Image (cartoon, rainbow, N blue to C red):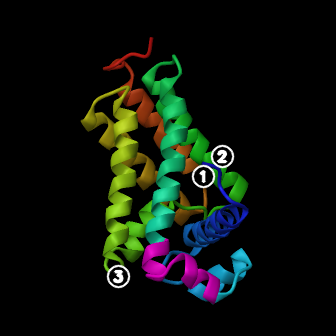
Amino acid sequence: MTESRADRRRNDTRTRLVRAATGLFRRHGIGSVGVGEICARAGVSKGVFTHHFPSGKSELVAAVAAANGAAVAELLARTMERPRAFQRCVRLMFDGYAQAMRNAGPDYGCPIATTVVDASARFPSARGAADHAFTTWRTVIASRSDEATATLVLAALEGAVILARAARDPTVIETAGRRLASLLDGAGDVRRVP
């Protein structure tokens, strides 16, 4: 079954709203960004927003967490599936985020972390979407390690991002990644990629 032109337009508009919200949430947090600002960034009216997100901002927050969660899971999977040492994969994760922060600016944060910190009390459905994203990321990382190590790596990365934003210095992320990788050195891959 092929997608109609109207369905494509509808999906494109929804995607534009999610992307606009993701960028704003990364930089300003969820609580300080209004629907009007998201609509302006996406180039749509509030009526169009309501059509795509009838439950309002809470539905959009969950959609942002789901979309970003899936995109990051895909990046992590590509990093983990390559035949390289697990410690190198960890370095690549941290170095990649530091480079993204350099490219986008020092206020480039994680919209999933923002969902938990800034919005989970106001939007309980967002907490579930954030938990799903983090669980998926841990599972992908654990494909090359174990669950406890994957949790450590993810917690260290998210913490390093917060510290780097506070310091306005992405080298904090690289430093944390190098140190963590050296601590993991010698542990080897629990599950090796062929």
Q: Position of residue 78 (x, y in %)?
A: 54, 31
Picture quadrant where residue 138 is located: top left
Q: CA distance from mark 2 to mark 1?
A: 7 Å
Q: Between 119 and 104, which is closer to the camera in this rendering?
A: 119
Q: CA distance from mark 3 to mark 2?
A: 32 Å
Tell me if 45 is positioned left or right of 174 in this view: right
Mark 1 to mark 3: distance in Å?
30 Å
At 31% from the left and 74% from the top, the residue drawn is: 124
Residue 11 x/y as whole percent: 63, 63
Secondary structure beneath label 2: helix
Q: In terms of secondary structure, where does tag 3 sit?
A: loop
Picture layout, residue 111 above or below residue 38? above
Mark 3 or 2 closer to N-term? 2
Residue 128 is left or right of residue 21, and the answer is: left
Q: Earlier in the sequence, mark 1 or mark 3?
A: 3
**From the viewer's perspective, is 110 left or right of 180?**
right
Q: Please name the predominant secondary structure of the magenta segment in the image.
A: helix
Q: Which residue is mark 1?
A: 170
In the picture of the structure, the residue carrying the numbered disc 3 is: 122
Amino acid type at image mark 2:
Gln
Residue 33 visible? no
> Magenta stretch?
47-60
- Label 2 with label 1: CB-CB less than 8 Å: yes
Q: Which residue is mark 2?
A: 99
Please identify, in this view, whether the residue under mark 2 or under mark 1 is nearer the observer: 2
Residue 142 image position (x, y, % from top left) = 34, 32
Labels 3 & 2 near each other (Cβ < 8 A): no
Crowding around mark 2 (Cα neighbors within 10 Å: few <14, some 14 to 19, many 20+) is some
